[in-house]
Image (cartoon, rainbow, N blue to C red):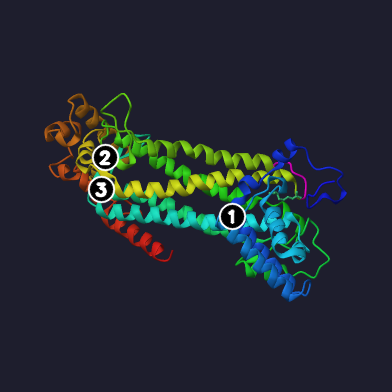
Amino acid sequence: KTNQSWGGRFAEGPKEAVAQYTDSQSYDRALYAQDIRASQAHARMLGRQGIIAPGEAQLLVEGLDRVREEIRSGNFVWKPELEDVHMNIEARLTEIMGNVGKKLHTGRSRNDQVGLSFRLFVADRLETWRQRAAGLCAVLVQRATEHANDILPGCTHLQPAQPVSLAHHLLAYAWMFRRDALRLTDCLDRVCISPLGAAALAGTTYPLDPQSVAEDVGFSGIYGNSMDAVSDRDFVLEALFDGSTIMMHLSRMCEEIILWANPAFGFVRLPDSYATGSSIMPQKKNPDVAELMRGKTGRVYGSLMGLLTTMKGLPLAYNRDMQEDKEGFLDADKTVEASLRLMAGMMEELTFRTDRMREACKAGFLNATELADYLVGKGIPFREAHHITGQCVAAAESQGKGLEDLPLPEMQALEPRIEDDVYAILDYAAAVRRRETPGGTGPQSVAAQVAQLRTWLAGM
Ligand code: ARG
């Protein structure tokens, strides 16, 4: 005989190894607050619908408050043999409240229960990610306004391409994190749907009011199909994809920070509080935070790929496989939240070595496009202008100079229409100032970006 809550038809309980293998309370206890919120909403609905007496509903709500307090204060005794957070809480409720506790699970299955609890949990976490993504965006916007007039080499293929303002470079990331926040808002629309009322898979015979449960927990609506409701884990997958995209953006930033901290670039000085040293090489100051963030991106992708693989090929409706949705998300949550927070802190304290950036613009002919555009202005077709400019680059390169250092007669030998006004055009900062197309690196375009991002941040 077993005393499991489902044990009526069992002659013996699970083997110790089986209990350990199927256990989830060791980690899904993280969902306790959401599980209690969901159970209280369910109890109130049972009372409103006359399925249990209103006084009983009230007792269940109070009992669940007490259980929550026990867990919060660390006085709750978790029992592995009770499998998961849901049964641990229900068993304790019954211990405290007696027989009325046994009425909580009326018209409900753990299948729709875990769906609602986990959706509430994921929604809470996504809201935090959203705030953190916006927070990082705000730091980037702030740093951008400090560096509106500083320039650095913009790259394609990691090779010098055209000069850009440091503000523009930083804002590129600000836009990514804004997009990430918007993606989370969109994802939350689908997370905040209550599956409660689907019961095990087919609905129930009790006159439940699922819509009122959804409203009680602050969700926007309910499932359309009970079988889909209990077997849908798209909401976790989407959340993990959004987290993966955030990590991918962070990882790209990390890569640049790591490169820029190398003295060969020397574009940033890491704050001491975000760097570590070497146990053998005394001179070292390593960008470990950025490296770990780049590395931890892998585990968030892993959680996404893991759950996609778990869900692949599952027949309708609930399958125990789905219990595997939690550890990956819990792990990803820790990583995404901390990474966004740390990156914001690091970006606040990072020093940009704008002198080094300006100096670096002189290598790699970043003003070659300017010369080609100048020749177009003199009536030369662009392809031809491109070719002439290439010849000027070759001439300058063979002398170890920049285009701006080539004497006028040498340029005129290659193209007689080049005049003295070319040197103003070849100025790197001027090249940045001239690019005022929408979203471009010119100062007005950058100011417009800052204004747009600030308007969005103000509404967050
Ligand atoms: N711990 C389970 C999970 O996370 C709860 C649902 C269990 N349902 C069941 N029929 N065994 O998926």
Label 1, label 3: how far apart the Cα atoms are: 63 Å
The residue positioned 59% from the left and 43% from the top of the image is 328
Residue 246 in sight: yes
272 sits left or right of 240 in the view = left
For the magenta stretch, what is the residue range?
Answer: 312-317
- In the rendering, at what x and y percent does residue 324 appear? 66, 43
Mark 1 vs 3, N-terminal side: 1
Residue 313 magenta: yes
The three-letter amino acid code for the residue at tag 1 is Asn
Mark 2 vs 1, N-terminal side: 1
- In the rendering, at what x and y percent does residue 383 appear? 33, 38
- In the rendering, at what x and y percent does residue 452 appear? 37, 61
Label 3, label 2: how far apart the Cα atoms are: 24 Å
Note whether ligand 1 is within 8 Å of mark 1.
no
Which quadrant is home to the C terminus?
bottom left
Q: Main secondary structure of the magenta part?
A: loop
289 above or below 449?
above
Q: Which mark is residue 269?
A: 2
The three-letter amino acid code for the residue at tag 3 is Val
* Secondary structure state at the residue bearing disc 2: strand
The three-letter amino acid code for the residue at tag 2 is Arg
Q: In this figure, what is the number of numbered marks?
A: 3
Q: Which is more foreground, mark 3 or mark 2?
A: 2
Residue that label 3 marks: 432
Residue that label 1 marks: 75
The part of the image, by quadrant, that contains residue 436 is bottom left
62 above or below 411?
below
278 sits left or right of 125 in the view = left
